[in-house]
Image (tube, rainbow, N blue to C red):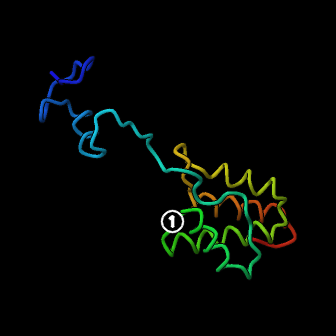
Amino acid sequence: MCKIKGCEANAVGKGLCAKHYMRARRHGSTKVVNKRGPKGPRGGDGIFFEPGDKDNLKSHLLAHRIRMSPRTFERYWTANKIMLWSRMTEKQMLRTIKDAQRPNGSLNVSKLVRDTVETYVKKHPEFDWD
C-alpha cells in the first residue's frame, strides 16, 4: 500500500503508488499537483498583425511565451494574413481562433488555417475556386 495517508493504491517504488511516486520525482513533493496542458494563453491572444509585420508577430508570440516550430509559425502567419484579407472583424477573428483551440487550450494551427480559408472562400464567391 502507498504510504500517503488516504491512498489505497499499491506501492510501486519507495513505498509510494505510481501517482505519488511520479509527483515526487517531478516536483520533489507528493503534494504538488499541477494541472495538465499548457500554461497561459497559447497560439494567439486576439492581437492581429498586418501582412508586413511578420517580425512583430514573432516577437509578440515570444514575449507571451508562445513557442511554435518555424513550420507551425508559417502556417499561423498564413492564417493571420487570410483573416485580414477576408476582412473579418476582430470579433470574428477571435471566434475563429477560439474554435481552433483544443480542450487543453493549445491552438490547432492546421484547423485555424483550414477555417480561415473556408471563411475567405465563402466571403469571396466572385472567384471561381474549382
At 59% from the left and 62% from the top, the residue drawn is 64
Q: Seen from this angle, which residue lies furthest bottom?
A: 52
Q: Is residue 36 left or right of residue 94?
A: left
Label 1 Cα crowd, 10 Å radius (few <14 / some 14-19 / many 20+): some
Residue 74 percent across, percent down from the top left: 58, 75
Residue 109 percent across, percent down from the top left: 58, 61
Q: Is residue 70 left or right of residue 77?
A: left
Quadrant location of the N terminus? top left
Of the pair 19 and 109, the residue shown nearer to us: 19
Q: Is residue 39 left or right of residue 34?
A: right
* Number of disc labels: 1
Quadrant location of the C terminus? bottom right
Q: Quadrant of residue 119?
A: bottom right
Of the pair 115 and 95, the residue shown nearer to us: 95
Q: Seen from this angle, which residue lies furthest right?
A: 126
What residue does disc 1 label?
67
At 74% from the left and 78% from the top, the residue drawn is 51
At 21% from the left and 22% from the top, the residue drawn is 9
Residue 42 percent across, percent down from the top left: 57, 56
Q: Quadrant of residue 45?
A: bottom right
Kindly identify the amino acid type of the residue bearing the numbered disc 1: Arg
Of the pair 29 and 40, the residue shown nearer to us: 29
* Callout 1 secondary element: loop
At 20% from the left and 30% from the top, the residue drawn is 17
Residue 31 percent across, percent down from the top left: 33, 32
Q: Is residue 71 above or below residue 115?
A: below
